[in-house]
Amino acid sequence: MSSETLGPETPATLVIVGAGPRGTGLVERIAANAPELYAGPGLEIHLVDPHPPGAGRIWRADQSPLLWMNSHAEDVTMFTDESVQMAGPVRPGPTLHEWAGIDGRTFADRQVQGSYLRWVHEQAVAALPPGITVHHHPARALRVSGPRDGRQLIRLEGRDQPLAADLVVLALGHLDAEPDDEQAGLTAYAAEHGLVHLPPDFTADSDLSALPAGEPVLVRGFGLAFTDLMVLLTEGRGGRYEGDTYLPSGREPVLYVGSRRGVPYHSKIGYDWTGERPPLPRFLGPAETDALLARPEGFDFRRDVWPLVEKELGFAHYHRLFTAHPGRTAIAWTDFEEKYEAASEGAEREALVASAVPDPRDRLDLAALDRPLDGVAYGSFEEFQEGLRGYVEGDLGRRHDAGHSADLAVFLGLLSVYGQLVRLGNIGPRWHGFFSHLASGPPGPRLRQLLALSRAGVLKFVGADMAVHARDGVFRASSPTVPGFSVEARALVEARLPEPTLRRALDPLLRRLHADGAGETPDGLLRVDRADGRVLDRSGRPHPRRFALGPHTDGRTPGAFTRPRTGGPAFRQNDATARAVLVFLRDLGADAAG
């Protein structure tokens, strides 16, 4: 296929690099919007992905059935509903639990989710109007080139001739990255001293066979990657649970885990919403976001945005507390709401809350939720093990008790806030970690397993601000949570995904985009136009023929999937990009015909 311009009878060509959930969502939106927006001579869609369409790499079939989704099956959908604010039509469809015929409260395994995604992909392709065809290329895309006003050339691994496209959309998902200086140094040290160092990776792709049975292994990271690691090194090696007791197989290593926070992510909430929802957004909505975007001098997240986030989450929390649990409040909601709205941040708001909410356990303390071990020191390692087990048990109890349903209101507030922050774009990495810790934690059963492993001596806790040093031929970990304690090991695992930065991405396409002048945020994400996902150059100019969606962009959205009836910013983005693609290709064909 050559790179000449579109002729009057030539089908337009769209290349989507990445055929996982995001690419599938884009195809679904193209199918929904094409009857209104596209009447060209045809459209050829080329999906470029070495993994199967729909499931992609992360949700592929060939991974352990022990690995679960991180959401209830009823909270996972690939279909739009009336809550999504978008220009295109709503095309409803089944949630995961409806499609699979399983209990909505189930945490399905990833193989089931992969089957759902493959089915969604097939449905999206089947819904395309006549004349729109889809081709899958099981290969990696290596480079995109071409003039701003002409067809784009996409080089594929193992193919001599490039694909020529009128438009390109990058829907790459989670990517591998080259190690930073610290990781490279640790890997080199491990090689020199015969140690094991596993850098950040998607856990299902890591070779864990080098971690020996019975030996200590340092694990840095206490989020979802750690949960997968914990499962694969325990049940995955033949251990099993009888109730709340873990029966080792004898093939497990001993895991010493720590992180910046030193605690696992908060448990998923284990009850359903009932009654009135908090009227969100209230203090961080479209008007406030528009005002921030309109500032000629720009905005600072900590100074200008975070106070609005705090007030919005507090509003969600106290609305639920006062309306659902009024016996635990000292004044009427209408009085509190008026004073809360007028109160400035800091001491004035804290004084209001203290006077109106007698029990400190009913007050929202975001700092304590985020960093519960700040300023805490234990007298011994054993005392800390007991203390952290108590913390996890308390978190599990609260997150499964509808008497604390203000916690679920805060979760709804987090989703509302995220929908606005997606529009702001460059907000830095702090928010994403905060959101994940509060809202994207493990299923409750996983934390109960964590407790059983701790009691069995297979899992041990190191503490907050875990420091790892490579010296004397070993790795050594310590934490200010337990002054004077350290542990030595011959293996270190970095239990987290690689950072999705342009400069360090192993993906050759992104590296070339960066070299060719694509814009990046201070924390290394690909800059895209907030309206439709067009890739921006370093001067902020959008590329007319290149779009990008997903976690490698500054338009990344919360979580991997969308909960039904929560507005779904990913759906909104997919719809806007699909419509922009169809309008561009329609107009291109009209120009050729004219």
Image (cartoon, rainbow, N blue to C red):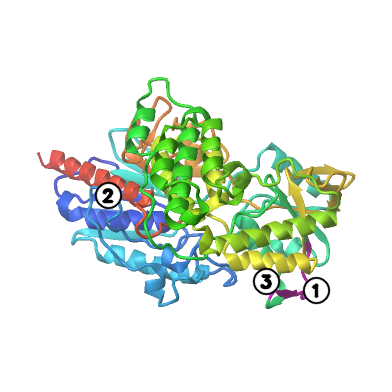
Disc 2 or disc 1, which is closer to the eye? 1
Q: Amino acid at mark 1?
A: Gly
Label 1's element? Answer: loop
Residue 53, given in percent of the width and then of the height, sits at 41, 62
361, above or below 101, in the image: above
109, above or below 210, in the image: below
Q: Earlier in the sequence, mark 2 or mark 3?
A: 2
Give the labeled residue for mark 1: 250
Label 3's element? Answer: helix
Q: Where are the magenta residues, as a range?
A: 244-254
Label 2's element? Answer: strand
Magenta: main secondary structure: loop
Residue furthest out toward the right:
472
Residue density around tag 2, few if under 14, some if 14–19, many if 20 or more, within 10 Å: many
Give the labeled residue for mark 2: 13
Residue furthest out toward the left:
594
